[in-house]
Amino acid sequence: MQKAYLVLANEYVFEGYSFGAPITSIGELVFTTGMGGYIETFTDPSYNGQIVMQTFPLIGNYGIIEDDFEGECAIKGYVVRYPCATPSNFRTDYTLDEFLKKRNIPGLYGIDTREVTRIIREYGVVNAMITTELPTDFTPIKNYAIVDAVKQVSTKESFTVTAENEQYKVALLDYGAKRNIIRELVKRGCSVTVLPYDTKTEDILALNPDGLMLSNGPGDPAENVVPIAELAKLSGKLPIFGICLGHQLLALAHGGETVKLKYGHRGVNQPVKEVSGTRTYITSQNHGYAVDSDTVKLGKVRFVNANDGTCEGIDYPELKAFTVQFHPEACTGPKDTSFLFDRFVELMKGGRV
């Protein structure tokens, strides 16, 4: 077993063991609390530029299943308490260790992930390095920043996934879209044309879609100046449904503001409640930024996080649009909010927000 280290920008150092690719990598260290769904986690493009740490102690017990990938793996490193080397699942293609080696991503195990989580909760999200040799200079770790994240993960060419029972045509702006967004739309009779993140308004409208889907994605939402400007032009011209980054970008397009959370919401057990109702939904989440509810000028906040009160969804009745911060498409669950895709279909039928 080769020793390896997790080195935090605030100079905390944790000694463990290397698995995956034996290389040095720097990223923004975040934790996620999901007990399952690790394949969805590290193939979610929203984790671009980040070192992902799982709080659940055993990861990899059902192996790696390529059919369950949500996108291309964009993480900078992976930290677990213990990686399972002998997965037990008839669908397994290979092990977690083999997955990381194939993609040249370093892994670290054998550290107290609970202690690291407490540090992040106390000090906030922090940059970190996975390495097999202790650094003498912390400057590269401290100076690391995620930039042009959406550009890195968005599709470079448009493509269409056709539904067998096509009833509607949806344009999907890919800011780092998870594949299950497409699956959820297709099974509801929607053919989906996936477009690069910077596609112009006139090119979208030329497709004559029945609705527009705004996907999830990574990075600071405010840096996406061009996509925000295009959404301001598109609004009101066709029904819109936004998820995660798509939710944030539409709010920014209409005068709202976003704030970076201390350590974000990442996991599959985040409670979200309706502002004007009695329901609370358990949701899958992965975001480090949130829309500031007090800055929402157009639209009405519909959902809030039951833990910290942050904005989790906005309705725009005047624009025939609605957005959510959480992930109703989460393929490993929970499935509480998958009805939102039905709501989008109803909106395309001529329904109201």
Image (cartoon, helix red, strand yellow):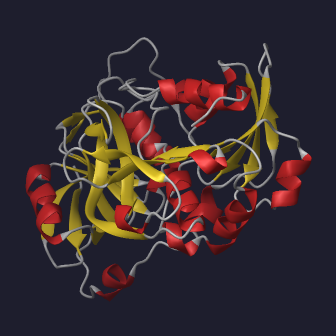
Residue shown at the point (15%, 56%) measured from the top left: 117
Q: Is residue 241 visible?
A: no
Q: Is 350 rendered above or below residue 125? A: above
Residue shown at the point (65%, 64%) measured from the top left: 151
Q: Which of the two residues, 195 or 39, is positioned nearer the viewer here?
A: 195
Residue shown at the point (11%, 67%) measured from the top left: 122
Residue shown at the point (75%, 63%) measured from the top left: 233
Quarter in which the C terminus is drawn: top right
Q: Is 212 rendered above or below residue 22? A: above
Quarter of the image where one finds residue 150: bottom right
Q: Is 177 rendered above or below residue 60? A: below
Q: Which of the two residues, 88 or 338, is positioned nearer the viewer here?
A: 338
Question: Whole-percent x and y of residue 60?
Answer: 31, 31
Q: Which of the two residues, 332 or 278, is positioned nearer the viewer here?
A: 278
Judge left or right: residue 72 versus residue 12.
Answer: right
Question: Whole-percent x and y of residue 72?
Answer: 57, 46
Q: Is residue 353 visible?
A: yes
Q: Residue furthest right?
A: 206
Q: Which of the two residues, 178 or 131, is positioned nearer the viewer here?
A: 178
Judge left or right: residue 66 versus residue 161.
Answer: left
Question: Whole-percent x and y of residue 288?
Answer: 36, 60
Question: Whole-percent x and y of residue 239?
Answer: 69, 41
